Image: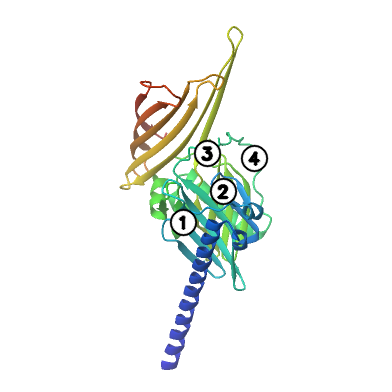
């Protein structure tokens, strides 16, 4: 019995040290990559030749774009990096940036080949707004071809992805729970991580809705880690990364990273008497957070930045605005009713010279009672 006990103890110690060694190895290359980003030299050596990422602008990123990156001298990690090592694959999440006003939430998937760790996939999303952000793309058509998995493994992962989207659509927290890990997180553009229990409460309180429309689906597998990237056809299209772990023969969601929403609108009026115009162009950037205070009561807060050029063909009619929103919702899990209250305070500022006294404030209060028949 003593020999058996000693053997088991040694084996556990070996596994623990081995896992710790892999974590330390990933942390080392993370630090080395950060130094390379600051110098703008040798960044590409940390990436796989087949690397495919998603930038903060929601665009796909390749190894050629990594090779062309410019130096970012002030770039630094703004919080403790989180590393999870699963065999030869590591998941890294971190908040990084050049300043508190220039933060990014990053998800990177590292894979090891021999003694070398390289980044196989990644997604970055901004935290907060960017005044110099280009206009986003407009709404997409809902007429898309259904995704068809090419292999049995892809089909297995897609079954989990489809089940999660249907669970959210049907307001079914138990089904969502069956296809997500206990420690699964949804990472938001505010830099927050929503735990599974919190998200399950959110699903339980919502009303049933249409199934999400998605396209550009791509599935990659790195050992026991599966990655689904796709484009969501919301009013403002988003590109998303869904990370799955294999547990008991089922692929379960472990990480979900969502991109920032952008809105843009354009209006042009042609008139026969006074000529063409006005030609209006509006875009805005939104973010928000909902927090379940109790299973019945949820608090909400949000922010909107909007730029409104009321006529691009003339001067002195450009306006920017900032809006703070507050609200709460009441909904008993499983009930057919819900009550929502919201308040918005908006202040508008002319975006041109000599605009003294033209500032404007707006207050909006709204309430809604919903009863599902």
Q: Tell me if label 4 and label 1 are in contact, CB under 8 Å.
A: no
Say which of marks 2 and 3 sits in front. Answer: 3
Image-quadrant location for residue 303:
top left
Which is in the foreground here, disc 4 or disc 1? 1
Looking at the image, which is closer to me, 182 or 124?
124
Residue 251 visible in this rendered orientation of the protein: no
Q: Estimate the spatial distance between the alpha carbons at disc 2 and disc 3, rounded to whole Å.
A: 13 Å
Residue matched to label 1: 76
Question: Mark 3 falls on what kind of element?
Answer: loop
Residues at discs 2 and 3 in contact (Cβ within 8 Å) = no
Q: Residues within 10 Å of mark 1 (few under 14, many from 20)?
A: some
Q: Nearer the viewer, mark 4 or mark 2?
A: 2
- How far apart marks 4 and 1 lie (CA) works out to 40 Å
Tell me if label 4 and label 2 are in contact, CB under 8 Å.
no
First-in-chain label (4 vs 3) = 3
Seen from the viewer's position, the closer of residues 173 and 246 is 246
- Judging by the rendered image, the residue that carries numbered circle 3 is 133
Closer to the eye: label 3 or 1: 1
Q: For the point 36% across and 41% down, which residue is it?
A: 335
State the CA–CA distance, disc 3 to disc 1: 21 Å
* Residue sticking out furthest to the right: 150
How far across and how far down the image is residue 251, in percent?
A: 54, 60
Callout 1: helix, strand or loop? strand
Q: Point out the tag, 4 or 1, that comes first from the N-terminus.
A: 1
Mark 2: secondary structure: loop
Observer-nearest of 115 and 241: 115
Quarter in which the C terminus is drawn:
top left
The first of marks 2 and 1 along the sequence is 2
Percent x, y of residue 244: 53, 59
Upstream in the sequence, badge 3 or badge 1?
1
| Label 4 vs 2, first from the N-terminus | 2
Relative placement, left or right, of 243 versus 366 is: right
């Amino acid at each position: 019995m003593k020999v058996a006990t000693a053997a088991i103890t040694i084996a556990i110690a070996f596994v623990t040290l081995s896992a710790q060694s892999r974590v330390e190895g990933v942390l080392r290359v993370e630090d080395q990559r950060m130094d390379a980003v600051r110098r703008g030299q040798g960044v590409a050596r940390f990436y796989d030749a087949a690397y495919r990422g998603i930038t903060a602008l929601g665009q796909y990123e390749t190894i050629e774009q990594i090779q062309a990156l410019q130096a970012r001298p002030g770039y630094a990690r703004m919080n403790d990096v989180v590393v999870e090592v699963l065999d030869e694959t590591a998941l890294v999440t971190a908040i990084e940036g050049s300043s508190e006003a220039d933060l990014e939430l990053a998800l990177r998937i590292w894979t090891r080949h021999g003694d070398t760790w390289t980044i196989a996939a990644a997604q970055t999303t901004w935290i907060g707004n960017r005044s110099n952000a280009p206009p986003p793309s407009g709404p997409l058509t809902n007429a898309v071809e259904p995704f068809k998995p090419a292999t049995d493994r892809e089909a297995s992962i897609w079954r989990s992805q489809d089940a999660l989207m249907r669970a959210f659509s049907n307001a079914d927290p138990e089904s969502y729970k069956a296809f997500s890990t206990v420690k699964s997180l949804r990472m938001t553009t505010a830099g927050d991580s929503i735990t599974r229990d919190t998200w399950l409460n959110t699903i339980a309180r919502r009303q049933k809705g249409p199934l999400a429309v998605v396209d550009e689906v791509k599935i990659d597998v790195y050992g026991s880690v599966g990655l689904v990237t796709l484009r969501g056809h919301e009013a403002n299209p988003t590109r998303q990364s869904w990370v799955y772990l294999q547990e008991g023969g089922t692929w379960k969601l472990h990480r979900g990273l969502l991109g920032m929403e952008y809105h843009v609108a354009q209006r042009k009026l042609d008139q026969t008497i006074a000529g063409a115009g006005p030609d209006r162009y509006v875009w805005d950037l939104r973010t928000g957070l909902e927090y379940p205070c109790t299973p019945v009561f949820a608090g909400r807060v949000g922010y909107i930045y909007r730029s409104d050029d009321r006529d691009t063909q003339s001067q002195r009619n450009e306006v920017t605005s900032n809006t703070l929103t507050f609200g709460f919702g009441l909904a008993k899990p499983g009930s057919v009713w819900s009550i929502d209250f919201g308040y918005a305070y908006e202040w508008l500022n002319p975006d041109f010279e000599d605009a003294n006294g033209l500032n404007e404030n707006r207050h909006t209060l709204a309430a809604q009672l919903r009863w599902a028949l």
